[in-house]
Amino acid sequence: MLARNENENGRILVVDDNVALAENVAELFEFDGLRSVVATSAEEALSLTLTLDLTAVITDVRLPGIDGTELVRRLRPGRDHVRFAVISAYTDQGTVNRAREVGAWFFPKPLDLRRLTRFVRGLEIA
């Protein structure tokens, strides 16, 4: 079970170079009462994190430039309260292991949005 996030006022950062997917996921979170912001690259995400109070980071694995697991590796230090998830249509064991190695949960595409929402809320997920 995940511990409930103490920071209910933070934002969820959704990072995916597929703009439509990222915006749809962010809209789902907003509809569910969760504040979110979209970045279309890891570099943009790193820039945004300088000014955002984060609750969770949801990132695609395959991004132009810095990939999603490297993004998590760079963001994780000092952010023990932030939940990190890596999403990908590539579900091979290597991709899943790389996500786990950087301390992120792995969610395959197509996304189970109910499960992902429970994750960012800090609720138990099966």
Image (cartoon, rainbow, N blue to C red):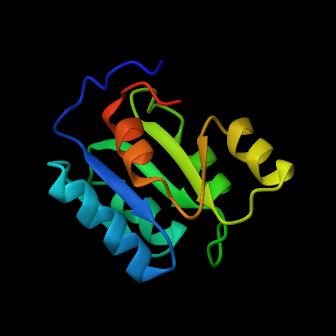
Q: Which residue shows up at 85% across the image and 51% down it?
A: 94
Q: Which residue shows up at 63% across the image and 34% down it?
A: 103
Left-right relation of 26 to 63: left
Give the quarter of the image for residue 100: top right
Left-right relation of 36 to 9: right
Q: Nearer the viewer, residue 9 or 77?
A: 9
Q: Which residue shows up at 43% across the image and 43% down it?
A: 115
**Percent coordinates x, y for residue 37 in the rendering:** 28, 63
Q: Which residue shows up at 82% across the image and 55% down it?
A: 92
- Number of marks drawn: 0
Above or below residue 33? Residue 110 is below
Left-right relation of 65 to 58: right
**Percent coordinates x, y for residue 90 in the rendering:** 74, 64
**Percent coordinates x, y for residue 33 in the rendering:** 14, 48
**Percent coordinates x, y for residue 72 in the rendering:** 58, 48
Q: Nearer the viewer, residue 115 or 105?
A: 115
